[in-house]
Image (spheres, coloured by chain):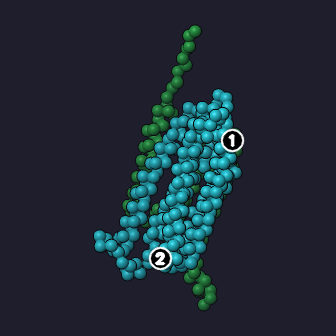
């Protein structure tokens, strides 16, 4: 096994043991992240249950096209990263770098659409919960404000995760250009890939909660 | 020789990953289409159902949850369990509460 020739820290029995520990550590971190976003989902369930009409009114104000395009962008970005991991497993650093640059560009497009365009439109429509007058009026205003509190907190939190992920992908690209990775050693690529796909999973959950459920 | 070199430079996992991507796009399209169904307000969260297989596809296809060490699956199952406990216990009050009408005098 090629991996046997890769050096490892003294506390691990082998390089393989070190790699498995790093991957398990990332999964444990992601498990705590599930609970972080789980609290947000719970707030959605609770708030929508008592304000269904207000949540539907809020959902109707969201930009479905941007949300849907962003979903496709993130799915493809996650795919590009996974393909990059497959490339480095066969020793192709060039393939890895190309895939990661694609993943990064798609993520950047997501950020521009979300925070450059969609947030701009939301604020122009006075949909920030503290706006006076608020963009949704009538008896559903309170529920719509709750919806947009959820919307801004969850999408900002997701955006922060995206930004951290983009920095990590940049770091992996820089290390790959230095020739740090090979088919025998690519643990950091795999660990960052787990985080990158998790950010995609979070969006796959937020997308229907924000854009689809209240649109009927 | 040239075909051998080309074969070696293309990951064997690529086809599987492309199928995963296609499945995600299809499920995303299904979810998008379902959102236009005239469902009753209380039934509308059903629109989210395609998101579940989408998450499974990402976890299994891109994150390789089934291929890693056993402890990885233990952490993933623990995360699901904690999430179910959080959402289950957290929403049980809201979903089972009975609101009685209050007679306002005056």
Question: Chain in cyan?
Answer: A
Which of the marked residues, 1 or 2, is nearer the chain's N terminus? 1
Classed neighbour count for the residue bearing mark 1: other residues with Cα under 10 Å, few (<14), some (14–19), many (≥20): some
Against B103, residue A82 (above or below) is below
Q: Which residue lies under the disc numbered 2? A: A181
Whether pointer 1 and pointer 2 mark residues with C-beta atoms closer than 8 Å, the reply is: no
Classed neighbour count for the residue bearing mark 2: other residues with Cα under 10 Å, few (<14), some (14–19), many (≥20): many
| Mark 2 element type | loop
Q: Which residue lies under the disc numbered 1? A: A125
Q: CA distance from mark 1 to mark 2?
A: 48 Å
Residue B47: give x, y in percent of width and height.
Answer: 62, 45
Residue A156: give x, y in percent of width and height.
Answer: 55, 49
Q: What chain does mark 1 sit on?
A: A
Q: Residue at x 61, y 47 (%)?
A: A208
Evaluate whether label 1 is on the same chain as label 2: yes
Q: Is residue A18 left or right of residue B15?
A: left
Q: What chain does mark 2 sit on?
A: A
Q: Which mark is residue A37?
A: none
Q: Which shade is chain B?
A: green
Residue B25: give x, y in percent of width and height.
Answer: 64, 59
| Mark 1 element type | loop
**Of residues A70 and A13, the one drawn nearer to the viewer in this rendering:** A70
Observer-side mark, 1 or 2, equals: 1
């Amino acid at each position: 096994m090629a991996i046997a020739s890769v050096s490892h820290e003294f506390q691990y029995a082998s390089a393989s043991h070190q790699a498995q520990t790093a991957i398990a550590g990332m999964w444990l971190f992601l498990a705590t992240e599930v609970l972080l976003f789980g609290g947000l989902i719970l707030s959605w369930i609770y708030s929508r249950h008592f304000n269904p009409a207000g949540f539907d009114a809020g959902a109707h104000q969201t930009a479905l096209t941007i949300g849907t395009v962003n979903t496709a962008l993130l799915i493809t970005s996650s795919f590009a990263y996974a393909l990059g991991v497959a490339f480095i497993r066969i020793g192709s650093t060039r393939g890895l770098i190309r895939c990661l640059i694609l993943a990064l560009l798609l993520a950047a497009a997501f950020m521009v659409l979300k925070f450059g365009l969609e947030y701009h439109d939301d604020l122009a429509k006075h949909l920030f919960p503290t706006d006076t007058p608020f963009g949704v009026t009538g008896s559903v205003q309170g529920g719509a404000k709750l919806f947009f509190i959820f919307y801004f907190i969850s999408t900002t939190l997701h955006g922060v995760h995206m930004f951290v992920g983009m920095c990590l992908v940049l770091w992996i690209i820089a290390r790959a250009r230095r020739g740090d990775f090979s088919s025998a050693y690519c643990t950091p690529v795999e660990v960052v890939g787990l985080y990158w796909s998790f950010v995609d999973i979070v969006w796959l959950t937020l997308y229907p909660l924000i854009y689809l459920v209240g649109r009927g | 020789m040239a075909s051998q070199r080309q074969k070696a430079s293309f990951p064997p996992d690529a086809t599987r990953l492309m199928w995963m991507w296609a499945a995600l796009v299809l499920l995303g399209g299904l979810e998008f289409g379902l959102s236009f169904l005239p469902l009753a307000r209380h039934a509308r969260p059903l629109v989210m159902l395609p998101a579940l297989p989408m998450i499974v596809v990402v976890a299994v296809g891109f994150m390789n949850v089934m291929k890693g060490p056993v402890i990885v699956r233990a952490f993933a199952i623990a995360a699901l369990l904690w999430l179910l406990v959080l959402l289950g216990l957290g929403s049980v009050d809201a979903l089972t509460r009975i609101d009685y009408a209050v007679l306002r005098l005056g």
